Image: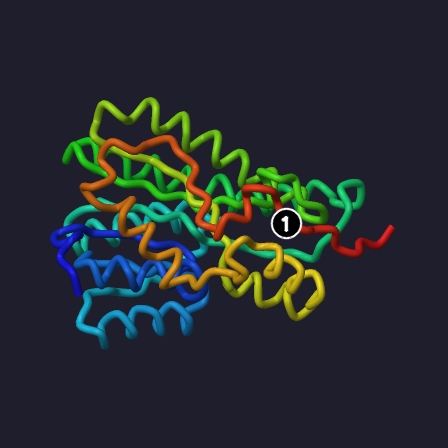
């Protein structure tokens, strides 16, 4: 374990699996105390236990980030347990079957916006006064190349993530004088969502992998987590409002993404 984040307290939402789990483990390895927040209690407890078993410090909180009072309780729990909220990683995700734009009703968009946009907005505004008081903070929001490239079949997800990107950039501009850095990660990772997608459309998943300049889809812990540690550290103190594509170069020319969608 390193000491890059010694004395720092972090929240990671959706940390029970995939990218969230990988980031939580790497933050703890760098010395941070981590609050693992997830709606899935078994998965969340598993991540927290993995951190503790490796000698790190982590606790689990059952949290539905689509409920504003749950998000408030999450920030309060981190403050009560660790005395601060230094690092906030908004990663929680909810998948839905691919569908055409015209077939998506408002309820689907509303749900996606609650988890992709409002959950992060609520957490950021709850954490902000505490970060401002300490004149130090790191916000890392997980977005997606899906939205940047307007991939088919996921207009609700794409729109929610692009709204979060715009919000993050504005917060970065307004909060920079307080020593708070806010950045966006767009990963390509073998997350739970990617595994489900690969099960449904193996040929398309294989095409995405083969088209990646590095010829593989990233590992949540080894490939994504380390970048999050950098963004959470003092080394990233002059980096804010940026989108980092941690995707093996997939963003350079895009990847094949034409799923079979029902009419």
Q: Is residue 222 above or below residue 176?
A: below
Outermost residue toward the bottom in this view = 53
- Decide if residue 253 is on the left or right side of residue 15: right
Tell me the residue at 42%/41% (across/down). 244
In percent of width and height, residue 259 lies at 75, 55
Q: Residue 199: in sight, yes or no?
A: yes
Q: Is residue 234 above or below residue 238?
A: below
Tell me the residue at 50%/57% (across/down). 214
Query: In this figure, which residue is indicated by the disc labeled 1?
Result: 255
- Decide if residue 150 is on the left or right side of residue 137: right
Figure quadrant of residue 113: top right
- Closest to the observer: 35 or 162? 162
In percent of width and height, residue 170 lies at 40, 25
Outermost residue toward the right in this view = 263
- Decide if residue 239 is on the left or right side of residue 157: left
In percent of width and height, residue 191 lies at 50, 63
- Closest to the observer: 247 or 71? 247
Callout 1: helix, strand or loop? loop
- Closest to the observer: 33 or 208? 208
Figure quadrant of residue 237: top left
- Closest to the observer: 258 or 119? 258
Q: Is residue 8 above or below residue 110?
A: below
Tell me the residue at 29%/74% (across/down). 50
Tell me the residue at 65%/64% (across/down). 206
């Amino acid at each position: 374990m390193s000491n890059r984040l010694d004395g720092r307290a972090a929240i990671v939402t959706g940390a029970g699996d995939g990218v969230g789990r990988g980031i939580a483990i790497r933050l703890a390895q760098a010395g941070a105390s981590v609050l693992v927040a997830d709606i899935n209690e078994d998965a969340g407890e598993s991540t927290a236990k993995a951190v503790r078993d490796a000698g790190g410090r982590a606790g689990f909180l059952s949290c539905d980030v689509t409920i504003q009072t749950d998000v408030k309780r999450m920030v309060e729990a981190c403050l009560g347990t660790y005395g601060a909220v230094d690092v906030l990683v908004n990663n929680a995700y909810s998948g839905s079957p691919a569908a055409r734009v015209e077939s998506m009703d408002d309820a689907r968009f509303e749900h996606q916006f609650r988890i992709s946009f409002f959950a992060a907005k609520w957490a950021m505004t709850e954490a902000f006064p505490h970060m401002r008081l300490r004149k130090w903070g790191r916000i890392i929001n997980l977005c997606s190349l899906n939205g940047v490239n307007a991939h088919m079949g996921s207009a609700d997800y794409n729109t929610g993530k692009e709204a979060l990107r715009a919000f993050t950039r504005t917060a970065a501009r307004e909060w920079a004088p307080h020593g708070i850095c806010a950045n966006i990660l767009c990963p390509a990772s073998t997350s739970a969502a990617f595994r489900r997608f690969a099960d449904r459309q193996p040929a398309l998943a294989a095409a995405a992998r083969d088209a990646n300049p590095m010829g593989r889809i990233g590992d949540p812990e080894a490939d994504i987590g380390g970048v999050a540690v950098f963004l959470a550290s003092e080394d990233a103190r002059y980096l804010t409002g940026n989108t980092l594509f941690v995707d093996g170069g997939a963003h350079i020319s895009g990847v094949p993404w034409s799923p079979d969608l029902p009419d």
